[in-house]
Image (cartoon, grey):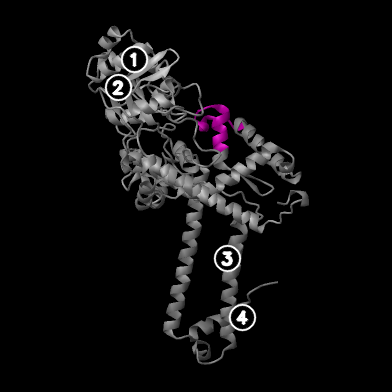
Amino acid sequence: MSKITDASQVSLARSLILSGVAAVIGLGLAGYALFTAKGTTTLVVPPEDVALVNQQPVARSDFDLQLRAVYGAVDINQLSAAQRQKVLDSMIREELFVQRGKELDVASVDTDVRSAMVAAVEAGIAADVMASQPTKEKLMAYYEAHKETYSNEGTMTARDLVFPAANAAAAHDALASGQAPDAVNAKFAGKDSGRLNGEDFYFAAKIHLGDATFAAARALAPKAVSAPIPGPDGVHLIYMVANKPPVALTFDEAYARVRGDYQKDAVNRVQASDEGFFRKRANVLIAKDFKQ
Amino acid sequence: MVGVSLGSMKKLGRWIGGLNVKVRAAGAIVLVALIVAGVWGVNTANSRAALLRMDPDLEAMDAVSMKFALGRGHGIYEKNCASCHGGGAKGDQSRGVPDLTDNDWLYGSGLTSDIETVILYGIRAPNPKTWRLADMPAFARPVPYAKEPGIKPLSPGDINDMVQFLASLRGAPFQADAAGRGAKLFSDRGGCYDCHGDTHGDSAIGGPNLADNIWLYGGSDKTVFQSIAYGRAGYCPAFETRLSPAKIRETALYVYSLSHQKSPSAK
């Protein structure tokens, strides 16, 4: 016996015992993997599923969701066995038809299926990126690199006054010298164009005034007046009441947008990388007349 | 045929008896450890299977299930959820991360099954079953909400009126005339009623209750203005492909317990 425990001596019994133990452990692991791993054949429905259709699981979570969708937001424990069976039957039917669809290679002819598959693969690629929480340092660095894009919308309160061409220069000088717009209107036969009405966001003012006039208005300080701008209805003068240019957002203020943009960029990168991999391993043949 | 004869068992017994004490002790320890690990593994697998087969909303009422799930759920929460929701699950208003302890639920009614659905499929996550029926439009943008072209931008004055109206709902000081205009805007041009209903929200689409003084991004006039002007679209990852169904159930029960500390099952 001492030969078995004496590591310095060769022992047939010891070799057999160790081999036996290793075989038992190996068989145990293989058996466990065989009956639990995805894609393996089993006669037992796993606890997370309600059914297996040709070994394809019908998930319990999907079943519960479907029960709620079919019977409304009621307590699913109150549903009868018949109601549950009806939903289960419809899910089994769906799975059978999906499997048949795979056999028929429906994706090769049905554009909706193709689109859905593309979207599903893209979503699958994006899922891991979206689920990972970027560190604050990474987001901060991204914010610093794209700082100019994170600002609020500027606002302006301005008046768009229209004068006859003959009075425009004098009206301009009067406004520039500090006279009130209403008084200048009255004195020089001017009127409000109606294009502006109180405080506007920059984008709205731009739409109302047009690009060129907005550009002139945007540069004005409060109580300043633009140079005369000829128009079909007369000469326009923009009188600025209040002008608040866009203010850069702090990191905390912009956090949600920064995180969203960071992840969008990361998703695009990973999807491009995966596409590259797909192309690399694919055998794509292009017709001679399409070759560049 | 594979069998063990009495004779071979006797031989094995003699052989073991012939080993020195240290080797026998080590063998016994290994054997016991293997048996304990096996029993623990089988027991855990059985408990997890039972956990998955039971209705999650009933489980929350079941002390045994909760006790089994909570210890495990806490660890999974710490690893996967705490980076956003915080270790204490109190959330972060500056980033619109919800407090999971206050029993106020944006999506669903706070049942374990609702929480589990969010963990499984996420909010606005790249998952076909994710919850993404609506976003908060950005009314200070030329196109506030691409999904609903009928929604038009509002002026800064309009948004201030709305802020005053919402201040009146939460019992903060407000300007009556502006609040009146805001109320009209709410059910008129703003189209706010579509998601927020009569201001009490709609948990089926994640439309927040505006009358309960619980604010995901903070309830100051400034943050409310920001929400209306620049929109909101919070995000929660989908864990369907990252965690096993059992782990998701355990996490859902743990999160449920955070806002139901006084229930007997959570003790």
- Residue count near mark 4 (Cα–Cα under 10 Å), binned few <14, some 14–19, many ≥20: few
Q: Residue at x 56, y 51 (%)?
A: A272
Residue A225's mark?
2
Residue A29's mark?
3
- Residue count near mark 1 (Cα–Cα under 10 Å), binned few <14, some 14–19, many ≥20: many
Total number of numbered labels? 4
Query: Is residue B182 visible in this depiction of the protein?
Result: yes
| CA distance separating discs 2 and 3 | 84 Å
Near-viewer residue (B72 or A230): A230
Specify whether disc 1 shares its chain with disc 2: yes
Residue A266's x, y, as percent? 48, 49
Name the residue that disc number 1 marks: A168
| Majority SS type along the magenta span | helix
The mark that comes first in sequence, 2 or 3, is 3
Q: Nearer the viewer, mark 2 or mark 4?
A: 2
Residue B233, relative to residue A198: is it above or below?
Answer: below
The mark that comes first in sequence, 1 or 2, is 1
Magenta region, residue range: A63-81
Residue A285's x, y, as percent? 74, 54
Q: Please, what is the three-letter code of the amino acid marked with disc 4? A: Gly
Q: Which of marks 2 and 3 is in front?
A: 2
Chain letter of disc 2 in the image:
A
| CA distance separating discs 2 and 4 | 113 Å
Near-viewer residue (B71 or A122): A122
Chain letter of disc 4 in the image:
B
Q: Please, what is the three-letter code of the amino acid marked with disc 2? A: Val
Q: Nearer the viewer, mark 1 or mark 2?
A: 1
| CA distance separating discs 1 and 2 | 12 Å
Residue found farthest to the bottom: A9
Q: Please, what is the three-letter code of the amino acid marked with disc 1? A: Ala
Name the residue that disc number 4 marks: B7
Quarter of image, res A247? top left
